[in-house]
Image (cartoon, rainbow, N blue to C red):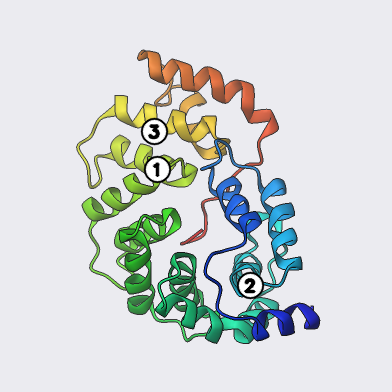
Amino acid sequence: MCLLLLAAACSPAPADPDPALVEAIDWYTGVAGTVDDARARELLEQAVDRGGVLSMMWLARVHSTGRMGFPRDEERARSIAGEVIDEVERAAESGVLEAVFLMGTAYDEGLGKPVDPVQAAAWHRRAAERGHVLGAHNLGNQYAAGRGVEEDHALAAEWWLRAAERGDAITQLRLGEAYEAGRGVPLDLERAREWYGRAAAAGNAQAREALGAPGGIGANASTPATEAYLRESGRRFGKMTALSSSCPSI
């Protein structure tokens, strides 16, 4: 690990994230089509072996809360982040999109920076406005919770929609919940079923439960799109890694 950190710290600011890191994030979020934490972890480990600072910061990120099936180890996460945060910040200031997002993580979770929800929201917004899926996801989370920004469920839904349309399974779940409750969006059970169905098809356990519970929202699904998602989720669910949405950010 020391050699990896030394290699990362001594390398120039990256122009782009390692391709294996990009693919890992896609499997982690569901942008790849389904959520597969095991595949995501394997790819992240490959990227970390090459020592790039963005990959190392992601390693800190997954250990911070136990993402991707990595053990939660906050001390290790802070140690790794502390070694690479200056390089990550330089990359972010130079415009590297993944680094911009990771600065949001740094301030959100105290990884190489003090916890500062306002700064986290500012960095997440910079990433989200440039099309970063997790930037939009986490900015939506901050609006939903009123963390670093004024609580606004309509804006939360708007940012979640940007991520959900790209395939992010947890924001698909969040939109299902929003439409079911009429929170930040009009109450619309058909749209709720469709968003739950999309999340379930990607392997999200909570969405599948929402659709499959006796008397639940999926009990009387009638639209072709919803029925297709329900069939697909039933085929895929046994193969997918369940996706936790208990953390304030993913």
Residue found 43% across the figure and 22% down from its top: 218
Return the residue at label 3.
195
Query: In the rendered structure, which amino acid carries the disc numbered 1?
Result: Ala
What x and y, as percent, mark residue 42? 74, 53
At label 2, the amino acid type is: Ala
Q: Which residue is mark 2?
A: 60
Where is the N terminus found, in terms of image quarters?
bottom right
Q: Which mark is residue 105?
A: none
Compute the Cα span from label 1 to label 3: 9 Å
**Which is in the foreground here, disc 1 or disc 3?**
1
Cα separation between marks 2 and 3: 31 Å
In the depicted structure, whether residue 74 falls above or below residue 47 = below
The local crowd at label 3, few if under 14, some if 14 to 19, many if 20 or more residues have their Cα within 10 Å, is many
User: Left of 12 or right of it: where is 197?
Assistant: left
Q: Foreground: 27 or 178?
A: 27
Q: Earlier in the sequence, mark 1 or mark 3?
A: 1
Which amino acid is tagged 3? Trp
**In the displayed structure image, the side of residue 113 where residue 195 appears, left or right:** left
Q: Residue at x 66, y 36 (%)?
A: 240
Which one is in front in this view, the residue at disc 2 or the one at disc 3?
Answer: 2
Element carrying mark 1? helix
